[in-house]
Amino acid sequence: MKSTFFKNVCIGILVSASLVSCKKNNPTPNSNVKYSIPTDYTFVDGSNKLTIDIKGQKYRIAMIDQISSEMTDSIADNQDNLFKMLNGTMFNNNADSLNNSSFNLIDKTANVDFFKSVFEMSVKATSSKLKASEGVAGYYNDNGKKRYFNENGLEPSQLFKKGIMGACLMNQVLNYHLNTSYLDAGTNKTDNNNRVVVSGENYTTMEHLWDEAYGYIFGGDINDHVSPEYNYWSEYIHIVNTDIYFNTIKKDIIDAFIKGRAAITNKDYTTRDAQIAIIQKSLSKVSAVRGVFYLTNEGKSALSVDGGIGAFHPLSEGYGFIWSLKYSYNPETKSPYFSENEIDVILADLMKGKNGFYDVDYLNANLNTIAEKIATRFGFTVEQAFINVD
């Protein structure tokens, strides 16, 4: 699926690259040239006009918000309506701008069949009107809020949120927009060297691809990453950064985005590629750290309360983050940190007890072992992922 998508996108880039303005005679790229690097993600052209456009990423993150709300509030009619929202329609709550935009999630999301199954799971749970119990889909009350679970204790809304963070947002950043084959496709590098901008715009194709990667991470924030309100990946980058063992990861990612964008504008591809590796490693690690945290710190610690019901929500979050590791990227191996098959085995082990999360004895005996497999691959310990500020 990924290779077909990649091929189609590259064709699209070749077409769009032909719709550009006239060329300028710029010097040959030189990685030794000195240039200034801004302190935040603000880039302007010679006329002081902003050269960044991430509206597509902002739209898609807003779409994720509304789909998640539908699943959480049990107001979706059926999985077909949820799937239509994935296609960019059927939004409500004064969402005409979303319905009428040219953007959608499905074109940017891998493994769509997974989300179809999650939508089906969600509708079954929310339409049952029953209190969830072992082997029965339904709801539990969590501090006055209803949470919906399938018959094995999985929470569909969390599988959707964390899953689409991986299969859409992270996948687009690590495997496409910050993949050098994608950035340099067609005439992108030549056009960038000669400052050939996209027709009607004031940025090159390469600059725009990099900006879109930034948007998938920080496009849902108010005032970008400097705001106290974070969303999706930027939220979890912020949380992981509060852990003493990972307290440079936020700065590492933001600085790499800024430095890499400046490098592109100045035709310094050696520096650009070094920043790509930093982002790929760091964002992949965020998903791993949170997956381990939700299994062990929040999940396992809640198993002894109310028959383990309180553990279902964090365990579902952990499940989603681990599933998302299919779309991680290790720049040293040029492949995910875990293969799809390895992740499937880990998740099968997680649900191996009788009726999944309801088997408290099985989880107590196996959660740490499962978490250690993930932590070890990323070079940290289970205990290092324990700090939380939620």
Image: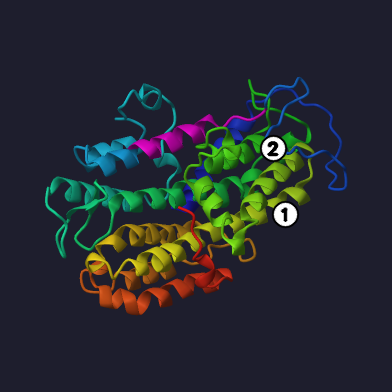
In the structure shown, which secondary structural element does the residue marked by tag 1 occupy? helix
Q: Is residue 47 above or below residue 209?
A: above
Q: Which residues are magenta?
A: 51-66
Among numbered discs 1 and 2, the one appearing first in the sequence:
2
Q: Residue at x 73, y 39 (%)?
A: 39
Residue 253, given in percent of the width and then of the height, sits at: 64, 50
Of badges 1 and 2, the one in the foreground is: 2
**Does residue 277 appear to the left or right of 350 in the view shown?**
right
Viewer-nearest residue: 182 or 309 = 309
* Picture quadrant of residue 316: bottom left
* Picture quadrant of residue 189: top right
Q: Which mark is residue 40?
A: 2
In the structure shown, which secondary structural element does the residue marked by tag 2 occupy? loop
Q: Is residue 104 above or below residue 48?
A: below
Residue underneath mark 1: 274
**Does residue 129 appear to the left or right of 165 in the view shown?**
left
Q: Residue at x 65, y 27 (%)?
A: 198
**Does residue 134 appear to the left or right of 48 in the view shown?**
left
Q: Is residue 64 magenta?
A: yes
Q: Residue at x 43, y 53 (%)?
A: 1
Viewer-nearest residue: 325 or 384 = 384
Residue type of the residue flagged with mark 1: Ala
